[in-house]
């Protein structure tokens, strides 16, 4: 079981059980909730 930090809220997320994830610059990014994923994607779209 690997845990990584949600880049939006800082919560630790289990990579094996994560329901929300995406890819950013070739790296898989994991989120604790859909709201964090949407916030991350919105921020990236502005850059």
Image: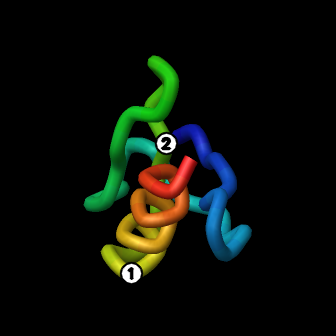
Local packing at callout 1 (Cα closer than 10 Å; few below 14, some 14-19, many 20+) is few
Q: Give the x, y percent position of residue 30.
A: 47, 50
14 relative to 21 in the view: left or right: right
- Answer left or right for 47 relative to 16: right
Crowding at mark 2 (Cα within 10 Å: few <14, some 14-19, many 20+): some
* Residue shown at the point (62%, 47%) measured from the top left: 3
Question: Which element type, helix, strand or loop, lies under badge 1?
Answer: helix
Residue occupying the point 46% across, 18% down: 26
Q: Is 4 on the left or on the right of 36, as rendered?
A: right
Could you say which disc has been placed on residue 14 in the image? none
Residue bearing mark 1 = 35
Q: What residue did someone put label 2 on?
A: 29
- Splitting the image into 4 quarters, where does residue 41 fall? bottom left
Q: Nearer the viewer, residue 25 or 32?
A: 25
Q: Earlier in the sequence, mark 2 or mark 1?
A: 2
Q: CA distance from mark 2 to mark 1?
A: 14 Å
**What secondary structure is found at the residue carrying circle 2?**
strand
Name the residue furthest right.
Answer: 10
């Amino acid at each position: 079981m690997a845990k990584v930090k949600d880049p939006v809220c800082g919560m630790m997320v289990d990579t094996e059980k994560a329901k929300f994830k995406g890819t950013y610059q070739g790296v898989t990014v994991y989120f604790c909730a859909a709201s964090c994923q949407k916030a991350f994607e919105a921020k990236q779209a502005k850059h």
